[in-house]
Image: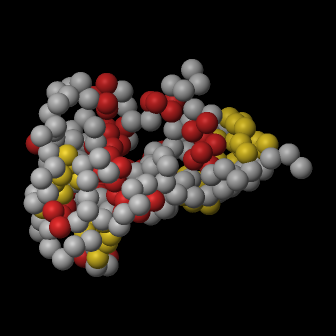
């Protein structure tokens, strides 16, 4: 039996291969599905739910859900985008995100998602959690205020760098990024070339001394909305 199948996203038939996730098939077809915890080169995690879609009437995560012949998928609908908006808004209120002062502004996926989804302000009250900054490492800083707990650094450190620098501690609202050391980042084997640093979608794990190498206004998402690289692929 052929591995080639067809699925339908927002009324448009697209080709897919058995074994792909819906997100992979959509990416190949130039259809962007918003995402945060998914990252090229890492196994999908399915934790942020920004990639929520509807398949045959049921909500699923596009990054983990495999394609199936004849699947009818809704992606760009008001209902689904409002779910995505509310998730992104929750990320904003759960942490302390000061975009206007953040070195990652314009390169930040959370900020770019907010622009793409047209979020003027969160509908939920800000929690203003008390979180820490660890600037002990000579080349890297961690600002937990901006962490969205996507786990990309955790998986990248393990699967791409062959280390175990990052992990999580706590549960629910107390869940936090942790490092593999009793106290400080400098005590880990993190290297400034580690892929875990680049995997951070926000300004939580940052390289020192390069924050403003590209001026604000000329950065990736200053120029084009997030998802454009996928949508432009087959044009
Ligand atoms: S991108 Fe699919 S759950 Fe996060």
Q: Position of residue 186 (x, y in %)?
A: 15, 62
Q: Is residue 188 above or below residue 220?
A: below
Q: Is residue 138 left or right of residue 220?
A: left
Say which quadrant the C terminus sits in: top right
Which residue is painted at 16% across and 54% down in the image? Answer: 141
Q: Is residue 100 left or right of residue 166?
A: left
Is residue 152 at least partly visible in the picture? no
Q: Position of residue 232 (x, y in %)?
A: 51, 25
Residue with the most extreme top position:
235
Q: Quadrant of residue 60?
A: bottom right
Q: Position of residue 203 (x, y in %)?
A: 22, 48
Q: Is residue 49 left or right of residue 132?
A: right
Q: Position of residue 28 (x, y in %)?
A: 61, 36
Which residue is painted at 51% across and 30% down in the image? Answer: 231
Residue nearer the viewer, 216 or 75: 216
Q: Quadrant of residue 65?
A: bottom right
Q: Quadrant of residue 209?
A: top left
Q: Please say which color scheme the image uses.
A: secondary structure
Which residue is painted at 32% across and 51% down in the image? Answer: 194
Q: Is residue 126 above or below residue 195?
A: below
Disc tally is: 0
Which residue is painted at 25% across and 69% down in the image? Answer: 179
Q: Is residue 6 left or right of residue 90?
A: right
Is residue 113 at least partly visible in the picture? yes
Residue nearer the viewer, 54 or 180: 180
């Amino acid at each position: 039996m052929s591995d080639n199948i067809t699925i339908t996203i927002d009324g448009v038939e697209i080709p897919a291969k058995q074994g792909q996730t819906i997100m992979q098939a959509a990416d190949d077809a130039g259809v962007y599905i918003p995402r945060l915890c998914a990252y090229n080169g890492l196994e999908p995690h399915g934790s942020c739910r920004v990639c929520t879609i509807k398949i045959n009437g049921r909500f699923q995560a596009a990054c983990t859900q495999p394609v199936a012949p004849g699947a009818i998928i809704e992606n760009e609908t008001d209902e689904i985008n409002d779910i995505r908006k509310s998730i992104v808004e929750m990320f904003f209120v759960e942490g302390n995100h000061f975009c206007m002062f953040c070195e990652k502004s314009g390169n930040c996926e959370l900020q770019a998602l907010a622009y793409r989804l047209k979020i003027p302000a969160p509908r939920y009250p800000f929690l203003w959690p008390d979180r820490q900054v660890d600037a002990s490492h000579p080349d890297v800083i961690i600002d937990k205020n901006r962490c969205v707990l996507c786990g990309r650094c955790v998986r990248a450190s393990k699967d791409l760098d062959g280390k175990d620098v990052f992990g999580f501690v706590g549960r629910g609202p107390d869940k936090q990024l942790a490092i593999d050391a009793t106290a400080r980042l400098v005590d880990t084997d993190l290297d400034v070339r580690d892929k875990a640093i680049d995997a951070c979608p926000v300004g939580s794990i940052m390289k020192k001394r390069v924050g403003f190498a590209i001026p604000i206004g000329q950065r990736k998402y200053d120029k084009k909305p997030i998802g454009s690289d996928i949508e432009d692929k087959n044009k």
